[in-house]
Amino acid sequence: MNCKICRQPASLFSVNTILGKYEISYHRCDTCGFIQTEEPYWLNESYADAIARSDIGMASRNIDMTGLTRAIILSFFDCNARFIDYGGGYGLLVRLMRDRGMDFYRYDRYAPNLFAQGFEADQEGNHQYELLTAFEVFEHLVNPLDEIRQMMHYSSSILFSTLLVPVPPPALESWWYYSLDHGQHVALYTLQSLKVLAQKLNLNLYSDQHSFHLLTDKKLSQTAFRFISRGMVSRLLYFMLRKRLAHRSLLPSDYMALTGGRLN
């Protein structure tokens, strides 16, 4: 098997059971360390529920990502442009970002839109967005290069989260992020594999070297990105830079667009 990132040989890493019944193999790239499963024939079953039952951290993750995303946008992007949350799940992040004055739209092919109805992104990729967010999406990508190129139809800047494989890589049964219970995580990245990916896409990579990353055609400071990615710093930056926003919140205008009425 060849690595789906750098196309170099990938050796058998381990075999384990997913969904409690399928014994599958994981392969690790000898060059960049990327870990991929065998061809994932089980995904229809894995996605019977679009959001895995074990993803109990979804709400708190969206709240955390709201603060970090806001700080990155205020620091490096046009905060009054349009943004897209790709693989946006139930639409919680989009609603939180709109509540904070940023014009976000949701794209997801699987999950129902519960929180951001009326704010769906262009499905055909005909509209360019200032930034695309893809939180906890990359580990689900069966063919990462092809699917990230699809994301680039929407934006040349992709802010994403995925937990990097520790060095040395842990055994399958000892690291929760392999997610053997639901089998949705079929692509696991090292920092080196992300660097190769960025090179192939002709983009720059910025990373906190743990779980928060940015691919973009912009030239930024790696040190600044890592500094801003800290939770305390991101909150402080919001209070310093929030005057750049045209609207403190889009909640009143969204309510009027959806109902024709005003919030008192």
Image (cartoon, rainbow, N blue to C red):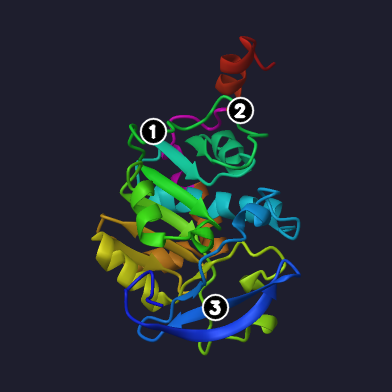
Q: Nearer the viewer, residue 120 or 145?
A: 145
Q: Look at mark 1 in the image and give the residue it sits on.
A: 124
Q: Which corner quadrant of the image does residue 8 belong to?
A: bottom left
Q: Residue furthest bottom?
A: 168
Tell me which segment is drawn in magenta. Answer: 240-250
Q: Which mark is residue 26?
A: 3
Task: Indicate which disc residue 117 carries.
Answer: 2
Give whichever of 156, 229 is nearer the camera: 156
Dot 3 amino acid type: Tyr
Of marks 2 and 3, the one in the foreground? 3
Res. 76 visible in picture: no
Tell me, for residue 159, which label it has, or none. none
Question: Is 140 in front, or is 24?
Answer: 24
- Tell whether 233 sits left or right of 1: right
Q: Position of residue 138 (x, y in %)?
A: 49, 60
Question: At x 57% / y 49%, what residue is drawn?
Answer: 66
